[in-house]
Image (spheres, coloured by chain):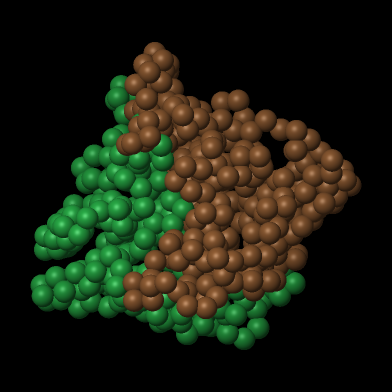
Chain colours: A brown, B green
Amino acid sequence: MAKKVLIVYAHQSSGSFNAAAKNAAVEVLTAQGCTVDVSDLYAMGFKATATAEDIKGEVKNAENFCYLEESKLAWEQGKLSADIMEEQSKLTEADLIIFQFPMYWFSVPAILKGWIDRVLTNGFAFSQEKRYSQGIFKDKKAMLSFTTGSLESMFSPTGINGDMNVTLWPLQNGILHYCGFQVLAPQIFWAPSSAVAEDRKSMLESWRTRLQGLLEEKPLSFISLDCFDDKAFQLKPEVQEKHASKEFGLTVGIHLNKSLPPHSQMKAGC
Amino acid sequence: MAKKVLIVYAHQSSGSFNAAAKNAAVEVLTAQGCTVDVSDLYAMGFKATATAEDIKGEVKNAENFCYLEESKLAWEQGKLSADIMEEQSKLTEADLIIFQFPMYWFSVPAILKGWIDRVLTNGFAFSQEKRYSQGIFKDKKAMLSFTTGSLESMFSPTGINGDMNVTLWPLQNGILHYCGFQVLAPQIFWAPSSAVAEDRKSMLESWRTRLQGLLEEKPLSFISLDCFDDKAFQLKPEVQEKHASKEFGLTVGIHLNKSLPPHSQMKAGC
């Protein structure tokens, strides 16, 4: 069956490298028979801030407003604002979500963080029971596709910005994997603004090539939820013991005070 | 001389634990003779998204708008929007910046990311030459003070969310240290919403106690810019050699494929 793809796109300019990367994804995936939808956040004037206005009608506790609780309740009662419900509906339909953005301050731009904060509502995108490998979106795939200002060498374990795997952990584990998504390896366009036209072209060509087989790619490895106890959410002793003689930690964050597994947030099968 | 403190505060409700933490900081620091200014982002309706509207008058290249370049130029020419200039002026005055927020998705809420994206303008807050230990704000201090939804045990190297030091790296190294700030240890309020009233009160008491000596605290350790070469920005061979026999990496991101130094993003002197 034809797959559905949602591209959540965050760049101000249709002349940008990010726009070209987004357009390449639309073209190649559409040519494969996919249905591709694009949320062009700046063009939509997407509201980034999580406020009481995201809830239609009265909130439960105006005096001590808690977004996490109020938005959960509003989702249950169908009272989230129309822009949030529209994005949730696109997400529900999609088999694959691609986030296309320029990295700002070692993370996503605020407008995209706003999409994450507002659309991935408590209840809709996760619950206490349904998260990580048991997450609500475990049958969907998601990935980051982004440009950097810095060169690749600067984002290494000996480079000035430090290991990119570390920078990716809060985004890929804390957001995507948290909601259950199978996380595809990130597509990183290293410093296209410093590159000559030919290199920029070749970056896009290599992305087009990757897009051909994207939907068949194996996702990054994370740890199954049942490896943790369900009280303190600590790795079970038997899992730790089994891993004790290994050289590397299990993943970037759950490193067991060992060296980080190299490339684990960058390549599948690491 | 009396110190100036800026609190960049991001919570929707004056009845929240974050509000109480912010109020405690205002009270204790004011009582010490500090001048304390608060940017209450939700109350200000702070614009979170980085757009061409942040620049007064014509932009240089509307066809291919690049925020990083255009905002640098606008800063040089005094053409940034009034709300950005106002925050930059507060930042210039301040000796210490405290960011007070609830952690959303392993990071800051979008409205606070918007403050970071828009106020820390290229040229004003950093340049190619002036960053990290040579950063523009190297005579200022900054710190994160935040609440989590998760328990402390969940944010450990064996916990389900992974090591909090990893989650803090992009924020503390990639934003604060990048601009040169001396980064004070974060103030983490672990899951106050799951805590009983007495424990919440005791968390705030311990913050008040810390605030008494906050301005004299030793900052977290990062690596001096001159430890890196100035072409590929790699750690110099002599620095690597000197560190070769050590058990731990230099810091979370610049880990040299060794185990991460424990608590290095949480405690000074690690």
Q: Position of residue B144 (x, y in %)?
A: 31, 58
Q: Position of residue A82 (x, y in %)?
A: 64, 71
Q: Is residue A19 left or right of residue A167?
A: right
* A83 to B148, vertically: above or below: below
- The answer to whether residue B35 is visible is yes
Q: Is residue A205 left or right of residue A229?
A: right
* B207 to B115, vertically: above or below: above
Please report the residue visible at 22 percent of the width from the left and 55 percent of the height from the top: B196
The part of the image, by quadrant, that contains residue B241 is: top left
Pick whichever, A67 or A31, lies toward us: A67
Please identify the residue farthest to the front as the structure is shown. A77
Q: Is residue A252 left or right of residue A142?
A: left
* B181 to B93, vertically: above or below: above
Please report the residue visible at 64 percent of the width from the left and 59 percent of the height from the top: A88
Across the whole image, how many numbered discs are drawn on residues?
A: 0
Pick whichever, B186 or B102, lies toward us: B102
Quarter of the figure that contains the C terminus of chain A: top right
